[in-house]
Every structure is written in C-alpha cells, then in structure tokens.
Amino acid sequence: GTAGMKVVCGGPDQPAGALRDLLEARVDAVPTGGTIDWMTYYFRDEPLAEALVRAHARGVQVRVAVEGHPRRRQANDRVIEILKRRIHGGLRVERRLFGASHLHTKLYAFSDPTPHALVGSFNPSGTVPEYDAELIADIGDQDRGHNLLVEIDEPKMVDTLIDAARGDLRERTV
C-alpha cells in the first residue's frame, strides 16, 4: 500500500461483517475526549449505532450525518431514532427536496488512537438481526457485496477530510 493509505476490502469472499466490524473496532478505540465524524447514505446497523452511543456516553464527541430520504425512504429511520435520542445534537439528517442531490459520501473519521479516516463505497446497510429481508434484498447488504474502505492516516489528508465533514455537520446539525 501507499504510505498513509491502506485498502480494506469486504465481500462474499471475506469474513461476514468485515467492514462493519472494522468500523466498530475503530469506534471502540476512541477514548474520552476524542472525536468521531461520520457521513453515510444508508445506516441501518443498529449494533453499530449503539457503539456510537457508547462512545458518546464515555465522553467522545460523536457527529453523524445520514441521508434522511434514501431511495427506500424509511431505511434509516430506526438508526436515526437511536442516534437522535442518545447522541444529543450530534446528528444531522439530510432531507433534501425531490430532485436534489443526496448525501452519498461515505466518510468515517476518528481522532484516536491516531487521526485517521476511512472513505470508500461501504455504508452499514444491514443490521443483526436483520428485521426486513425484503428491504435488504432491494438495497443490498453492503457487508455481503464487494465494497472497500481506504484507510488514510496521512495527517494533512485526514485534517482536510475531517474539516470538510465538520464544516458540513456544523451547518446542519439537529
């Protein structure tokens, strides 16, 4: 890999949940006083949302932006409710007007143990246990398809990504 970058792949040839487990491990590694900044289109993984809630409870500043009107309108609603109630102002739900662009960025940034960000094609679209087989058949479980996250730890690149995410989150946090 390139210095400062590492590609992590998920898919049917990888262990189940490889990318979501990577994200959960990164969330769990951020200590009190740290920060987590996320942006994603689909976010249905309730145990991963609970990991963010635990981080918030231990004193991590958690900021999440999620699409409020994905193609399957209610897909993110359960996770949105978990986060809205329990991370106190750190959630921004994008609800754009019909025809407007949607939030398709997949960015997961962490301040600790060293600043790093993961960007790529993966969003946590499934949950365990899966309660809506029809929905997941339609949108796909990103852990079962070929997806990747590029982990970036080059300080200037990470700062640029985090600054962009934080600027966007500051403007519309609910």
Image (cartoon, rainbow, N blue to C red):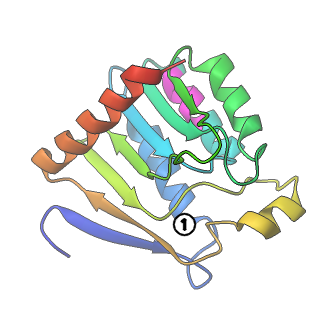
Residue drawn at x 82%, y 56% as measured from the top left: 130
Residue drawn at x 54%, y 78% as measured from the top left: 146
| Residue 3 spot, x, y in % from top left | 12, 67
| Residue 84 spot, x, y in % from top left | 64, 22
Q: Residue furthest bottom?
A: 13
Tell me which amino acid carries mark 1: Ala
Residue 33 visible in this rendered orientation of the protein: yes
Residue drawn at x 75%, y 36% as measured from the top left: 77
Relative horizontal placement of residue 38, taking residue 69 as reference (left or right): left
Residue 112 visible in this rendered orientation of the protein: no
SS at mark 1?
helix
Residue holding disc 1: 18
Q: Is residue 74 within the magenta segment?
A: no
Residue drawn at x 51%, y 48% as measured from the top left: 101
Relative horizontal placement of residue 54, taking residue 47 as reference (left or right): left
Q: Residue furthest front?
A: 99
Query: Which SS does the magenta portion mostly show?
Result: helix
Q: Quadrant of residue 149?
A: bottom left
The span picked out in magenta is: 51-56
Total marks in image: 1
Task: Look at the picture and state if 75 lies above or below 145.
Answer: above
| Residue 138 spot, x, y in % from top left | 79, 67
Relative horizontal placement of residue 112, taking residue 54 as reference (left or right): left
Q: Is residue 54 within the magenta segment?
A: yes
Q: As rendered, which of 83 and 174 lies closer to the eye? A: 174
Q: As rendered, which of 52 and 103 lies closer to the eye? A: 103
Mark 1 packing: few (<14 Cα in 10 Å), some, or many (20+)? some
The quadrant of the picture occupied by the C terminus is top right
| Residue 39 spot, x, y in % from top left | 46, 42
Q: Quadrant of residue 150?
A: bottom left
Task: Look at the picture and state if 47 lies above or below 14.
Answer: above
Q: As rendered, which of 83 and 98 lies closer to the eye? A: 98
